[in-house]
Image (spheres, rainbow, N blue to C red):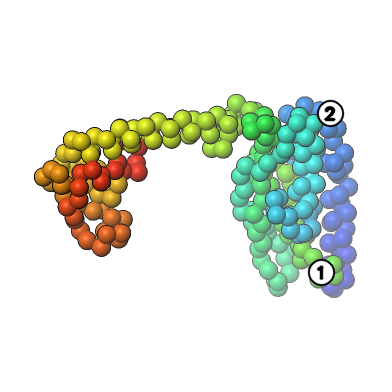
Amino acid sequence: MKNAIAWAAAVAFVSGCAIPPASAIDRNLSPERIVQSLNGRALTARGDGDAVYGIAPIKEFLQPAITRCAADGGALVVLARAEVRFAPKVQTGTGPQRAALHLPTKVGCRVNGTLAWGGTLGYDKPMFFVSSWAQSTYYYATTATAFVPAAQLEWTESNSSANLEATRARNEECTALRQVMTERLRSRPEVGMNVGSGVVIDVRLPLVLVQYNALGRQLKGREEEWVPATSLVAGYECPR
């Protein structure tokens, strides 16, 4: 019986590979055609781990996109991952009843720091089979891919060049605003002003009474304290 199951697994593996492999896709196609050509393909994967793609066959499956991106002068990067749960391909009543892999769900072609194009990757009808004969676990799924243009990636991805630049600009603005607020705190402190570790609750220059927040109490070991106004600094949040 075990030999029969093992033979069935081998047949299933060969059947999955009977579909032309993704590596046979013409790398000269446009990025959009490349991603579209990967949609709806039967993926049979042996569970050999891969630090970037979860399992090694995912990298082989994405090789046309990897090569196309390299031709564009960039590198294909994983932008998002998710846990994919696999059901048993053969119901035996024994052995594991489910398996899970952390696999890529979105990739992008990064060229000189900018996301030029990308794609989403889904896994329909995920199943697995544990072969005691081959001493391996095989994973099966039908891929679902969709092209994502550069404009959408630049808008949605936090590490896109546009969003990184916007974050840098916000940080520079906040740094300047904190400096202005620090100067105001030290020269014209008022009750209710927020400081780095609490709030001003009384002013008797050259001292002010600061009521500490949770972090301030942890650092100072007290609820409140009179401190020189010249020692005040603005809080970590961006002043508005």
Q: Nearer the viewer, residue 172 or 106?
A: 172
In the figure, is residue 233 to the left or right of 39?
A: left
Q: Quadrant of the N terminus?
A: bottom right
Q: Nearer the viewer, residue 39 or 11?
A: 39
| Amino acid type assigned to the residue bearing label 1 in the image | Gln
| Residue 237: percent from left, percent from top | 34, 41
For the point 34% across and 32% down, the residue is: 177
- Which residue is labeled 1 in the image? 135
Rendered image quadrant of residue 121: top right
The numbered mark, 1 or 2, whose residue comes first in the sequence reads: 2
| Amino acid type assigned to the residue bearing label 2 in the image | Asn
Q: CA distance from mark 1 to mark 2?
A: 39 Å
- Which residue is labeled 2 in the image? 28
In the figure, is residue 123 to the left or right of 34?
A: left
Q: Is residue 104 above or below residue 120?
A: below
Q: Is residue 147 visible?
A: no
Q: Secondary structure at mark 2?
A: loop
